[in-house]
Image (cartoon, helix red, strand yellow):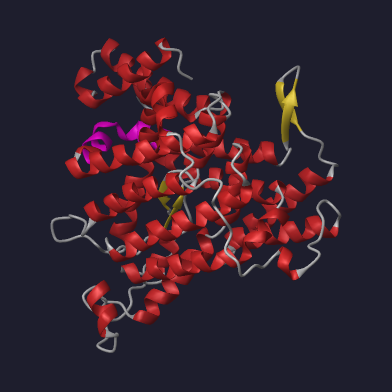
Amino acid sequence: MSMIEKDLQPGLPSSNNPKILEKLFKLTERQTTVKTELLAGITSFMTMSYIVFVNPIILSDAGIPREAALAATIYASVFCTLLMALWANFPVAVAPGMGLNAFFAYTVVLGQGLSWQTGLGAVFISGVVFLILTLTGVRQKIVDGVPDVLKSAIGVGIGLFIAFIGLKNAELVVANEATFVGLGNLTSAGPLLAIFGLITAAFLMAKRVKGALLISILGTSILSMIVGFIAFPKALSDVVSFSLPSMSETFFAMDIMGAVGYGIVSVIFSFTIVELFDNLATLIGLSRKAGLTDENGKIQNLDRALQADAVGTMASASFGSTALNAYVENATGISEGGRTGLTALTVGILFFLTLIFAPLIYFIPSVATAPILILVGALMLSEIKHISFDDYTDVIPVFLTIVLMPLTFSIAQGLAFGFISYTLLKLLTGKRDQIHWIMYFVSVAFIINFIMGGH
């Protein structure tokens, strides 16, 4: 995902910062203040809070009870964001990743026919794998071994996949027996409401309104009630509750042995590849924007941030949600001067407070969240600017990666064709020196998965 970023405006150091906050977050050392950090946290929360409504709807498509999915989404976001704040001192909030949730729901559960409990088991094991790879330093080496063109292609492909899901949920794209897909009925209420939400969100984003996506979701939902597409809440208790939503239906419901029995390599490997590049690249980019690099270019506490991400993913699976990602939308908070974990702590507290609006999830129709998927997908296309189209041994793998993700309705399939074709083309054209050893391992793993009947 990507957001329009402002020029950085660092806060000014202050000797008036409370001692406990100064000790925890090193505010003066990073040239910021409590006020600046709080404002940055509020800004980051406004730009990424849409995930609270979008993620449960995606997970409910996989069969996870919506209220439990909402609770799991919020608790997982709070838990890992607090780890980022207090363990890594990063001004970065974390939540279930867009793309990772789609991969879980539509590729792993619906596409491969696994139960959502087995899917959560795979997510948990992937968290364990992430932690091992992080502690051993292998995680960075894997990312370094994948060519930049494929890293960019993965982002673009996932963007198209997410956008396609959004178009489908909005009923703007529907099944067609003659042409496989076709345009939906633009005179019916659902598509019209989705178009309203899409235009509203795009307009607000163009005007750089904070919370544009959240405003669009709520505005489209209210309009849906007004036109009779969904019912109005009958009482205040229908939208606000001071009793916390329960995640009892999903808490530790993951089936780890089921994931192992199904064939851990194919599912876990795909989760690992999808999560590795997106999250690590985002963390590195955000930390550099926040000025958290030393004179040698090394990022302060990056290892702790990666550890927090891995532990957070295990916790998320235990709660009943998917793998976590650092959101690029954090760039908006960093642009407001966020430099420390106090920014993330602020976001975590605000995420927790959204629990009182848990009942509201039942009054958010899919046509209100579908435009957000479309726009997030559109924003992810920015990665295409990093792709060179001069070398056919790059262009063809990139094309296969991008186009096969939405056309096969599977991120893993796009990855497989991209990695395998890249390795084969480089070998056949005598460009063996451009292939990192990790590419052989990845390609062979995908080939074995195909032979074993993986999807």
- Establish if 33 lies above or below 385: below
Query: Magenta span: helix, strand or loop, mainly?
Result: helix
Depth check, front residue: 359 or 232:
359
Bounds of the magenta segment: 140-153
Question: Which residue appears at 82% of the width and 36% of the height?
Answer: 185
Residue 7 visible, this orientation: no
Residue 419: quadrant of the picture: top left
Q: Position of residue 105 (x, y in %)?
A: 55, 36
Question: Which residue appears at 64% of the width and 63% of the height?
Answer: 215
Q: Position of residue 279 (x, y in %)?
A: 36, 46
- Establish if 127 lies above or below 412: below
Residue 211 visible, this orientation: yes
Q: Position of residue 396 (x, y in %)?
A: 42, 21
Question: Which residue appears at 74% of the width and 53% of the height?
Answer: 196
Queried whether the magenta region covers residue 281, the answer comes back as no
Residue 263: quadrant of the picture: top left
- Establish if 23 lies above or below 62: below
Q: Position of residue 219 (x, y in %)?
A: 71, 61
Q: Is residue 53 left or right of residue 336?
A: right
Queried whether the magenta region covers residue 151, the answer comes back as yes
- Establish if 144 lies above or below 226: above
Depth check, front residue: 228 or 171:
228
Q: Is residue 449 left or right of residue 211?
A: left
Give the total number of marks visible in the rendering.
0
Depth check, front residue: 178 or 271:
271
Q: Residue furthest bottom?
A: 16
Q: Is residue 163 left or right of residue 400?
A: right
Question: Which residue appears at 86% of the width and 56% of the height?
Answer: 227
